Image (cartoon, rainbow, N blue to C red):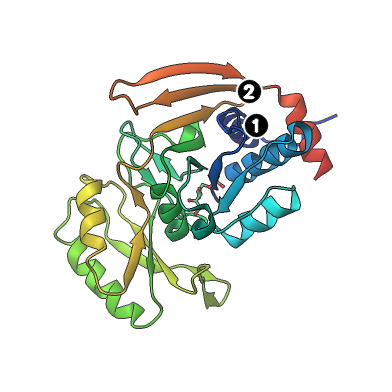
C-alpha cells in the first residue's frame, strides 16, 4: 500500500509528535495554527483520551479551536487561562537565532499575542524552513481594512529606507475578495526577498498607522523541534544562550493510522 503521507507531512508529524511530549498534565498551553500545529492538536487529543491529560488550551485561530474541541481538548480563552506555560506553533521560516516569519496561515496576530503571553514558545517545523536570512517567504502584515491602501503606500515608503532586497507588496486575496483574519482585518504580503535587520523592520512596520501587527517573531521563540521524513526530530534549545541539541525518534506507523482515521 502506498504511504498516504508526503515526505513533508511525515517531517511535520515527527516534529509535532516530539513537541507534544513537552506538554504536561495541568498545563496551560497555546496551540498554533497551520498543518504542523494540526498534527500537534491531534496528538494532544490522543493523549487526552489515552492518558487523561488535563489541559487549558488557548487556540490561535478559529480553525485550531474547532479541531481542538473535536479531539476532546479543553479550550479556554486567554483571559480564562491568564498566562500560559507553553505555546507550540509552526513557522514559515526560521533562522539560526530563532527569529521567525509567521502568518502564512493568516493567524499571526493571535499567534503573537498567545506566544508572548507564554513562559516558553516551541516552534515545530520541517528542516526546509530553516534559512540563513529571512525574507524568501513573503512577510505577512495585518492591517485594518479602513484605509488599507494608505497603509500599504506608507509601508512601501518605509521599506525604501530598510535593508531589504525586494519591496513588492500585495493584498492577500480569498478568491475575489480580500482575505480576512479572525479579527476581520486584511493582510498585506511583503516580498522582501532578504531581510537584513528583522528587528528593525518589525519595529518600523508596527509604527505605520493601520498596521496591527507583522509576522516577524523576534526574541519570542525559545526552542525549535525540527522534524525529518524518517521520523527523527531534533530539538534545538536557545533558551540558555548556548544552543543545546538533542534528538529523538518518532514511530511513523502511528502517523499513518491517525491519517487514515481522519
Ligand atoms: C499560520 C502560521 C503557520 O504556523 C505557518 O504558516 C506554518 O504553517 P504549516 O505548519 O502549515 O507549514 O504562521 O499563521
The quarter holding residue 256 reads: top right
Q: Does 181 sit above or below residue 29?
A: below
- Residue name at image x 56 percent, y 39 percent: 27
Kindly state the secondary structure of the residue where label 2 is placed.
loop
Between 198 and 218, the residue placed more toward the observer is: 218
Asked if ligand 1 lies within 8 A of label 2, the reply is: no
Quadrant including the C terminus: top right
Kindly state the secondary structure of the residue where label 1 is placed.
helix
Q: Residue furthest bottom?
A: 146
The residue indicated by pointer 2 is 231
- Residue neighbourhood size for the residue with mark 2, other residues' Cα within 10 Å, grouped as few (<14), some (14–19), many (≥20): many
- Residue name at image x 51 percent, y 36 percent: 125
| Residue 41 relative to residue 218: left or right | right
- The answer to the question of whether label 1 and label 2 lie on touching residues, with beta carbons closer than 8 A, is yes
Number of marks in picture: 2
- Residue name at image x 65 percent, y 40 percent: 39
- Residue neighbourhood size for the residue with mark 1, other residues' Cα within 10 Å, grouped as few (<14), some (14–19), many (≥20): many
The residue indicated by pointer 1 is 10
Residue 243, percent across and down? 34, 21
Q: Residue furthest left?
A: 161
Quadrant including the N terminus: top right
Q: Does 220 sit above or below residue 235?
A: below
Residue 56, percent across and down? 60, 47
Asked if ligand 1 lies within 8 A of label 1, the reply is: no
Residue 83, percent across and down? 45, 49
Mark 1 or mark 2: whose residue is earlier in sequence: 1
The quarter holding residue 19 reads: top right
Residue 169, percent across and down? 34, 65
Amino acid at each position: 500500500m502506498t504511504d498516504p503521507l508526503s515526505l513533508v507531512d511525515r517531517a511535520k508529524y515527527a516534529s509535532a509528535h516530539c513537541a507534544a511530549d513537552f506538554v504536561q498534565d495541568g498545563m496551560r498551553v497555546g496551540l498554533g495554527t497551520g498543518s504542523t500545529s494540526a498534527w500537534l492538536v491531534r496528538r494532544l487529543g490522543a493523549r487526552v483520551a489515552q492518558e487523561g491529560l488535563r489541559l487549558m488550551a488557548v487556540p490561535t485561530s478559529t480553525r485550531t479551536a474547532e479541531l481542538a474541541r473535536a479531539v476532546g481538548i479543553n479550550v479556554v480563552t486567554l483571559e480564562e487561562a491568564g498566562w500560559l506555560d507553553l505555546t507550540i506553533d509552526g513557522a514559515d521560516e526560521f533562522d539560526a537565532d530563532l527569529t521567525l516569519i509567521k502568518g502564512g496561515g493568516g493567524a499571526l496576530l493571535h499567534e503573537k499575542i498567545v506566544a508572548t503571553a507564554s513562559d516558553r514558545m516551541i516552534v515545530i517545523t520541517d528542516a526546509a524552513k530553516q534559512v540563513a536570512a529571512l525574507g524568501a517567504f513573503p512577510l505577512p502584515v495585518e492591517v485594518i481594512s479602513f484605509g488599507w491602501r494608505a497603509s500599504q503606500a506608507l509601508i512601501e515608503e518605509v521599506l525604501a529606507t530598510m535593508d531589504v532586497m525586494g519591496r513588492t507588496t500585495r493584498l492577500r486575496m480569498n478568491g475575489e475578495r480580500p482575505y480576512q483574519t479572525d479579527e476581520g482585518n486584511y493582510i498585506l504580503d511583503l516580498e522582501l526577498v532578504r531581510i537584513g535587520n528583522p528587528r528593525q523592520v518589525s519595529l518600523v512596520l508596527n509604527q505605520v498607522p493601520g498596521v496591527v501587527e507583522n509576522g516577524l517573531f523576534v526574541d519570542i521563540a525559545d526552542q525549535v523541534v525540527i522534524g525529518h521524513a524518517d521520523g527523527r526530530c531534533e530539538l534545538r534549545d536557545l533558551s540558555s544562550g548556548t544552543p543545546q541539541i538533542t534528538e529523538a525518534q518518532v514511530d511513523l506507523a502511528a502517523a499513518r493510522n491517525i491519517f487514515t482515521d481522519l
